[in-house]
Amino acid sequence: MLATLTSKSQITLPKDLRTLLQLEPGDKVAFFPLPDGQISVSKAGKSTFAKLRGVLPAPAQAHSVEEMNKAVLDAVAGRHART
């Protein structure tokens, strides 16, 4: 499969490749350089909130929704009291 580079450095992926990668409008495409000089092309995964699980450390203690709401209200009240 061949694609031509335009004067704006853009290419159109051939239909067979788009079909193979199951690409749809708006999808991201990832390019990975390989040690032998070739490039691997794949459909980039979509980011989800589920992938963020475990990024932050667990809190020292769990807080109830009521405690979190009070903390937010206290912070907002504190900011307004300073102005």
Image: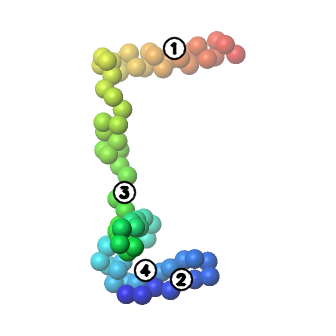
Q: Residue furthest right?
A: 83
Q: Secondary structure at mark 1?
A: helix
Q: Is residue 18 shown above or below 46?
A: below
Q: Which residue is mark 4?
A: 13
Q: How many marks?
A: 4
Is tag 1's residue or tag 2's residue first in the polypeptide sequence?
2
Residue 21 placement: quadrant: bottom left
Of labels 1 and 2, the one closer to you:
2
For disc 1, the marked residue is: 74
Q: Earlier in the sequence, mark 4 or mark 2?
A: 2
**Percent coordinates x, y for residue 23 in the rendering:** 36, 72
- Where the C terminus falls, by quadrant? top right
* Left or right of residue 72: residue 83: right
Packing grade of label 1 (10 A; few <14, some 14-19, many >=20) is few
Q: How is the image coloured?
A: rainbow
Distance between the alpha carbons at the discs numbered 1 and 3: 37 Å
Q: Nearer the viewer, residue 32 or 78?
A: 32
Q: Residue at x 40, y 20 (%)?
A: 68
Q: Secondary structure at mark 4?
A: loop
The Cα–Cα distance between marks 4 and 2, rounded to whole angstroms, is 10 Å
At numbered mark 2, what does the secondary structure look like: helix, strand or loop? loop
- Residue 5: mark in rendering: 2
Say which of marks 4 and 2 sits in front.
Answer: 2
